[in-house]
């Protein structure tokens, strides 16, 4: 399980709680001989065995094993022990190993987890290694900025490998039958949501995420409509800016008007399954569900485009967690571990992994490969991410309290907004107060 710290809770207390609860299972994933967080291993011989933890085991196991096979062929003196960990369990596995020992040499780390892991001294800073690497100048600048920001903005602790932008999937067959244009703007989106809804026939224009993971999707809709381009104004968050309040009111009003009532409890799996099996016009998710839609609907019945723009073409979107590879400080063979990271983030390997996942490559050479050009959803997402016209609102993944504030603490409150039991303004004012307190505490501890 993941231990979260409430705003105002001392860091030392949180660490003790993690130690007490998790140390009992410190060898759950096997001890590779590495130490605990903060211990410094060594550069090693550059030969021998290293351990790699895949943070999306099962889903991406096959492609990682291909990459490892290629790496071992190119580096016959190095063997990679692969450990696949389900995405839902990886945070607790890292917490366990940080406190009890047994960290890998290399691990997959999403930006949303990065702050907690780096703050405990578990990761090796990578700026110097990257500067001297063949990867220097070949990684997407915005992804580098994102992972740097996620760790507090000072140092690079992961090499980015992929991003998965927010996507608006829409049923091209239903839009064509209704004579509707593609929902490329928010105005077109709301028009389509209304016109495609026929409750008596159990047809809806949109499916909204009301369960687990709802806050990030709501934030994307808010900032996308308000046009506000920064999460902070000084040390105060902009989430409860009047323009964001107005945007959330409009977005939340879709519930039960142009969406199924069951959406109130939808996490991403329920939402995706519902859209794939029914006659719902639009779905907001990310690149990760593209293959599910292909299997369910076939490629001719839908498109996946970047989230809508304002009517003047302005595109504002919140940051999606960038996935990356971290080098653990306790590794006793950092030379070999870094070689593996370089190889995995190189053109061929990064292209192979992202093609399998349908995600946006971090390697700029891989982003220009033929499969990206042929995969419209990925290509449009990559173009939106790299366009100077796109404004990215970086979510504060660096806050130790971000995960709990954006999930467990506020998802039930957002459901009350959808149900009309509280207002969008009160919800956002309460969220803002929590965020401002967390930001103040983070700054105080960083001084």
Image (cartoon, grey):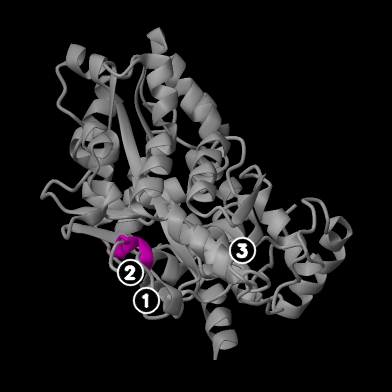
**333 w.r.t. 445: above or below:** above
Where, quadrant-wise, is the C terminus in this rendering?
bottom right
Residue 110 locus on image (x, y percent): 52, 56
- Horizontally, is 407 left or right of 292 in the view? right
| Displayed quadrant of residue 84 | top right
Front position in the image: 88 or 440: 88
Residue 434 locus on image (x, y percent): 55, 68
- Horizontally, is 21 left or right of 9 in the view? right
Residue at (48, 44) in percent of width and height: 70
Q: Which residues are magenta?
A: 139-144
Spot the residue most to the bottom.
447
- Horizontally, is 419 left or right of 45 in the view? left
| Nearest to N terminus: mark 2 or mark 3 | 3
Residue at (25, 42) in percent of width and height: 369
- Disc 2 or disc 3, which is closer to the eye? 3
Spot the residue most to the right.
24
> Circle 3 sits in a helix, a strand or a loop, which is it?
loop
Spot the residue most to the front.
76
The reply to whether the C-beta atoms of the residues labelled 2 and 1 are less than 8 Å apart is yes
> Circle 1 sits in a helix, a strand or a loop, which is it?
helix
Q: Which residue is mark 1?
A: 131
Q: Which residue is mark 3?
A: 47
How crowded pointer 3 is (Cα within 10 Å; few <14, some 14-19, many 20+) is rated as: some
Q: Which mark is residue 136?
A: 2
CA–CA distance between discs 2 and 1? 6 Å
Indicate whether residue 140 is drawn in magenta: yes
Residue at (79, 58) in percent of width and height: 31
How crowded pointer 2 is (Cα within 10 Å; few <14, some 14-19, many 20+) is rated as: few
């Amino acid at each position: 399980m993941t231990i979260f710290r409430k705003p105002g809770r001392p860091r030392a207390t949180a660490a003790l709680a993690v130690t007490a609860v998790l140390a009992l299972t410190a060898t759950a994933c096997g001890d590779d001989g590495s130490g605990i967080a903060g211990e410094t291993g060594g550069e090693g011989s550059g030969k021998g065995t290293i351990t790699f933890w895949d943070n999306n085991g099962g889903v991406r196991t096959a492609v990682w094993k291909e990459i490892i096979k290629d790496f071992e062929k190119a580096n016959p003196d190095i063997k990679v022990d692969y450990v696949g960990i389900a995405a839902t369990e990886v945070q607790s596995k890292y917490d366990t190993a940080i406190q009890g020992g047994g960290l890998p040499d290399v691990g997959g780390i999403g930006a949303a987890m990065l702050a907690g892991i780096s703050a405990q001294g578990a990761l090796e800073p990578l700026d110097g290694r990257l500067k001297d690497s063949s990867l220097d100048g070949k990684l997407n600048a915005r992804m580098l900025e994102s992972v740097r920001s996620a760790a507090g903005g000072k140092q690079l602790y992961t090499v980015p490998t992929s991003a998965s932008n927010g996507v608006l999937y829409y049923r091209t067959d239903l839009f064509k039958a209704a004579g509707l244009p593609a929902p490329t703007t928010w105005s077109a989106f709301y028009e389509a949501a209304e016109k495609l809804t026929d409750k008596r026939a159990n047809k809806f224009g949109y499916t909204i995420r009301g369960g687990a993971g709802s806050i990030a999707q709501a934030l994307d809709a808010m900032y996308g409509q308000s046009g506000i381009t920064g999460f902070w104004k000084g040390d105060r968050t902009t989430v409860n800016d009047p323009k964001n309040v107005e945007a959330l009111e409009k977005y939340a009003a879709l519930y039960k008007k142009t969406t199924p009532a069951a959406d109130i409890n939808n996490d991403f799996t329920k939402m995706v399954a519902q859209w794939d099996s029914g006659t719902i016009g639009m779905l907001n998710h990310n690149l990760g569900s593209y293959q599910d839609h292909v299997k369910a609907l076939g490629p001719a019945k839908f498109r996946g485009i970047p989230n809508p723009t304002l009517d003047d073409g302005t595109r504002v979107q919140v940051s999606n967690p960038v996935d990356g590879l971290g080098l653990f400080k306790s590794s006793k063979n950092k030379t070999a571990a870094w070689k593996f990271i370089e190889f995995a983030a190189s053109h061929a390997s990064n292209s192979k992994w992202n093609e399998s996942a349908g995600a946006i490559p971090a390697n700029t050479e891989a982003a220009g490969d033929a499969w990206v050009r042929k995969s419209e959803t990925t290509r449009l997402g990559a173009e939106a991410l790299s366009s100077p016209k796109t404004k990215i609102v970086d979510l504060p993944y660096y806050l130790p309290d971000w995960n709990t504030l954006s999930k467990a603490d506020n998802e039930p409150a957002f459901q009350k907004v959808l149900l009309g039991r509280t207002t969008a303004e009160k919800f956002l004012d309460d969220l803002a107060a929590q965020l401002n307190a967390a930001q103040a505490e983070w700054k105080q501890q960083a001084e």
